[in-house]
Image: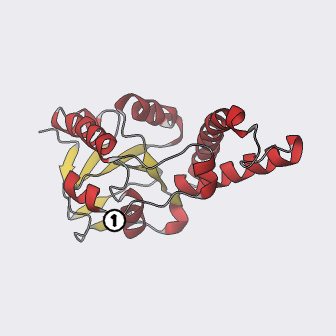
Amino acid sequence: MSNNIIWNPSRIEIRPQSLVMFCGIANSGKSTLAKKLFPEKNIINTDEVLENTIKELLNITKRDIDITPESKEWKYISDHLANVAILKSQEFINDLIINASQTGDIVILDSAPHNYKDRIATIINFFPYFENIYLIVAFPDIKKVESHKSKSISANQISLGFYYPDICSLSIDFANLDTQIVFENIADEVTKAFIITDLNSDIEVLI
């Protein structure tokens, strides 16, 4: 067992000048766990950034070319706008993290990619800005995840084709994450990885 992987810790110690990334499949409780463990002022909410980016794009599209989701031309541009929204929101998140790193305080990213390749690329991107990078994995049983009420998706997101993953997609993502944990590459490139299977357990965070 890797010394960099801690299962269900009762205490998590975070050193100064650190980035803490929460990882897990959709609806696994990442954001809820982040708010439970850390001050909300330190948390970068990825859902909020995406929603604000989509709103801005919709406003620009309506103002500049007079096309809205109700327009007959919408189907020709919605896929493009969705890709732009993803790229722009990621750029904004990166800027928020880099700017926050200058304060010397810890920075919390409430949703990091559960896909290995994308997560490693994200981690490496922030190496120059933090002395330590921690990964907290929300990893409840897949049956519990499937029983959770699905996170609501705004009308703006639906208009761009965003959707909540179905049970099949959740199961595939869970299996992928489980494989990373079993082979211990979940802890690659991070100071420590904490695996949390019971999100209701009491965990003391020392900063």
In the picture provided, is 200 more to the left or to the right than 125? left
Indicate the position of residue 164 as horizontal and vertical percent values: 44, 50
Q: How crowded is mark 1: few (under 14 residues within 10 Å), some or many (20 or more)?
A: few
Indicate the position of residue 146 as horizontal and vertical percent values: 27, 55
Q: Which residue is drawn at 16% across and 38% down?
A: 2
In the picture provided, is 105 more to the left or to the right than 35? right
Residue 41 visible, this orientation: yes
Indicate the position of residue 20 as horizontal and vertical percent values: 41, 51
Q: Which residue is drawn at 44% across and 36% down?
A: 123
Indicate the position of residue 186 as horizontal and vertical percent values: 27, 37
Q: Mark 1 points at which residue?
A: 206
On the image, which quarter does residue 51 sit in? bottom right
In this rendered view, identify the residue nearer to me: 103 or 182.
Answer: 182
Which image quarter is the N terminus in? top left
Looking at numbered disc 1 in the image, what kind of residue is underneath it?
Leu
Residue 126, placed above or below residue 137: above
Count of residue discs: 1
Q: Residue at x 64, y 53 (%)?
A: 156
**Could you tell me which secondary element the residue under label 1 belongs to?**
strand
Residue 141 visible, this orientation: no
In this rendered view, identify the residue nearer to me: 6 or 73.
Answer: 73
Residue 97, placed above or below residue 29: above
Indicate the colouring scheme: secondary structure
Q: Which residue is drawn at 63% across and 48% down?
A: 159
In the picture provided, is 190 more to the left or to the right than 118? left
Farthest-out residue, left: 1
